């Protein structure tokens, strides 16, 4: 059951959708000169969300939160 929910999360709720939206936002911000720095920031956020948080974005269900 957790596998099915993780797949649904990846497709609809988090991982892939969030990454695509940040990349599209970055492309839209590059249209104007004023938006270029914000576009760069959007691409950095997309890279962070896709690569650094991959374990949490791809399979958040079934993980335990451990306080530091």
Image (cartoon, helix red, strand yellow):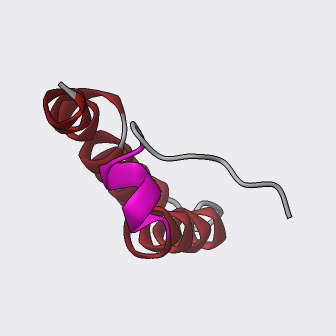
Give the magenta range. Answer: 53-60
Quarter location, residue 11: top left
Q: Is residue 48 above or below residue 7?
A: below
Residue 68 left/right relative to 52 = right
Between 62 and 18, the residue placed more toward the observer is 62
Q: Residue at x 39, y 75 (%)?
A: 51
Instruction: Where is residue 62? Give x, y as percent.
Output: 40, 39
Task: Give the farthest residue toward the right.
Answer: 68
Tally of numbered discs: 0
Residue 37 seen in render = yes
Q: Position of residue 66 (x, y in %)?
A: 72, 54
Which residue is found at the position 66% from the left and 48% from the top?
65
- Magenta residue check for 49: no
Residue at left offset 33%, top offset 48%? 59
Give left or right: position of 57 versus 33: left
Which quarter of the figure is the C terminus placed in?
bottom right
Residue 57 belongs to magenta span: yes
Residue found 24% across the figure and 41% down from its top = 10
Residue 37 spot, x, y in % from top left: 64, 72
In the rendered image, the quadrant that contains the N terminus is top left
Residue 8 falls left or right of residue 14: left
* Residue 55 rendering spot, x and y as whole percentages: 39, 63
38 or 49: nearer the viewer: 49
Question: Of helix, strand and loop, which mostly describes the magenta segment?
Answer: helix
Residue 31 in view, yes or no: no
**Image: 15 above or below 44:** above
In depth, the one of 63 and 8 nearer the eye is 63
């Amino acid at each position: 059951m957790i596998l099915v929910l993780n797949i649904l999360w990846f497709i609809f709720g988090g991982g892939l959708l969030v990454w695509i939206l940040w990349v599209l936002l970055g492309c839209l911000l590059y249209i104007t000169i004023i938006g270029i720095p914000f576009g760069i920031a959007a691409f950095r956020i997309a890279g962070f969300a896709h690569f650094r948080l991959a374990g949490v974005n791809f399979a958040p269900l079934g993980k335990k939160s451990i306080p530091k």
